[in-house]
Image: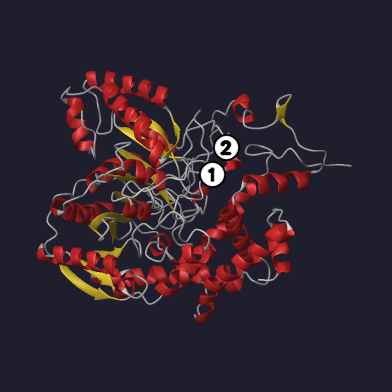
Amino acid sequence: MDITALKIRDARKMLDGREISAPELAKAYLDRIAETDGKIKSYITVTADSAMKMAEKAQKKIDSGEAGPLCGIPLAIKDNICTDGVKTTCASKMLENFVPPYNATVMEKLEKEDIVMLGKASMDEFAMGGSTQTSAFAKTVNPYDTGCVPGGSSGGSAAAVSASLCTAALGSDTGGSIRQPASFCGVTGLKPTYSRVSRYGLVAFASSLDQIGPIANCAYDCGLILNTIAGYDPHDGTVSKNPVEDYTAKIGQSVKGMKIALPREFYAEGIDDSVRKAVLAAADVYKSMGAELIDCSMPSLKYAVAAYYLISSAEASSNLSRYDGIKYGHRSKIGENFNELIANSRSEGFGEEVKRRILLGNYALSSGYYDAYYGKAMALKQKISAEYADIFEKCDVILTPTAPTVAYGVNENISDPAKMYQADICTVTVNIASLPAVSTTCGYDEKGMPIGMSVIGRKFAEADILRVADAFEQQFERRLPKIN
Amino acid sequence: MDLDMVRYLAKLSKLNYSEEELAKVAKDMTSIINIMDTIKDIDIKYDPFADNKNIYLNDLREDISAESFPTEKILANALNSENSFVVPKVVE
């Protein structure tokens, strides 16, 4: 059986049509992981035994005719989403042996649908990074070129989908961590509206920006997963009570007459020519489908990276102060007194990038600097949100590149944190303004590396952006990676 | 960013650095702060009232007791003894 780039919809037909059983499907992926993941390194933990058990349970449901859209579908779960009884490391030595005593709400919802979890996908440590090279356990590489990064922080999830090591995956996105790796790995990733999906059980990075979302082979599959994971949760006070729609309902509708805005700052200096050309060519495809392209501006984009890093690091420094080596997490063997034990545990457990973010966050929040940095960043959050609101007065969706470049070499940029931060310019404003956005592949550069574009929508307009992304996907010839 | 500032932040953050590491961190933090300083160019103020209108304070869930996690399961991730976390001596 060929599971290459298998979509959920097609897997569903095969399972319901008895062409294949859920255990056979799970086994096919597990075999492929055993064979290929040594090269890609997308998983930190492979849960082969429990996957087979989940598949057998799913098969019973299929046999009884009660299977939902995700029943028996093999998924990878980012390793910062708590899984009851299964190690959740956040790709950090700090949580190397952490076994959560509970499931994240998204896992509860997925397990109720009888998905099959294949394992926990690698990521940048504590989701801080855009390359997955800060992972303490599995420095994932790009399936299109194993000398290149898969992006990040959900690089394991994106690479696993791209290399057909799962049907789809869950990632999390604080400043682009679903969309940018989806772009680098040539797959589709959806960052839902802030508050659409419960964060209960997602290891906290920046609580006002974090959001869980799907990475899959197409926009339709992202919609199917969002249908299951979205919705109210008494465990997360920030979750919206807005009713959960069918996010696939608008897929297939024409984009004729839709207004698509292109904010010119997203196509300016700093964006590679190949990326700019591919995204503008995709805009022309929409035009040929009858959509109207609208020129617009986002003057505050130049401040976005700074505002994002100040807000996210300030929240991270507070969130990560819980790691003291006492209740869970790495505990140093050296420490005569309380403070010494905490400082030693944290210094041994956290990697360099995580430490830098904690320092930056504490700097932004410290007395004498608070107003100039954190206060100003929060003011910019309001300004950027207002600029998005202005643009949405004139359009239905916004189209931008997902990243300024295609995937770069594993040894490039990593030693220059400032340069790495600048590369987030295309994605961070979406988190700052709490909006939904989906990244899908719109072309390939001369070396065959995927180029991603992002469709940004109004709050809770996931169904609209998935419809727009799907319209492009339907006429786009996707090139699959040839894993060398 | 000078070394004294990095030392101060490291202390606030409960992180240890050797002198050699401190110099590298100071260099990295200087280039990071240079990016952060771009926001000094814009003169705007945060409006705390504008952000609070979407918080529904009367929409809290009922205060109903729910089942607790089993103690063994919670303690399994920590150094523990006699049903409690083990901490270093705090009072001299």
Q: Position of residue B32 (x, y in %)?
A: 56, 68
Q: Residue A275 sits in which quadrant?
A: bottom left
Residue A231 appearing in the image: no
Residue at point 64% right, 50% down? Answer: A321
Q: Position of residue A324 (x, y in %)?
A: 68, 44
Q: Nearer the viewer, residue B20 or A173?
A: B20
Q: CA distance from mark 1 to mark 2?
A: 9 Å
User: Label 2 crowding class (10 Å Cα cut-off): few <14, some 14-19, many 20+?
Assistant: some
Q: Check the image and report above or below for A132 versus A117.
A: below
As drawn, is A134 to the left or to the right of A42? right
Precedes in sequence: disc 1 or disc 2: 2
Badge 1 sits on which subunit?
A
Seen as rendered, the residue at the extreme right is: B92
Whether marks 1 and 2 lie on the same chain: yes
As drawn, is B34 to the left or to the right of A456? right
Q: What residue is pinned by disc 2?
A: A96
Residue A163 tag number: none
Amino acid type at image mark 2: Glu
Q: Position of residue A348 (x, y in %)?
A: 66, 45
Amino acid type at image mark 1: Ala
Badge 2 sits on which subunit?
A
Residues at circles 1 and 2 in contact by the CB criterion of under 8 Å: yes
Q: Secondary structure at mark 1?
A: loop
Q: What residue is pinned by disc 1?
A: A136
Residue at point 35% right, 65% down? Answer: A404
Q: Secondary structure at mark 2?
A: loop
Q: Nearer the viewer, residue A147 or A167?
A: A147
User: Label 1 crowding class (10 Å Cα cut-off): few <14, some 14-19, many 20+?
Assistant: many
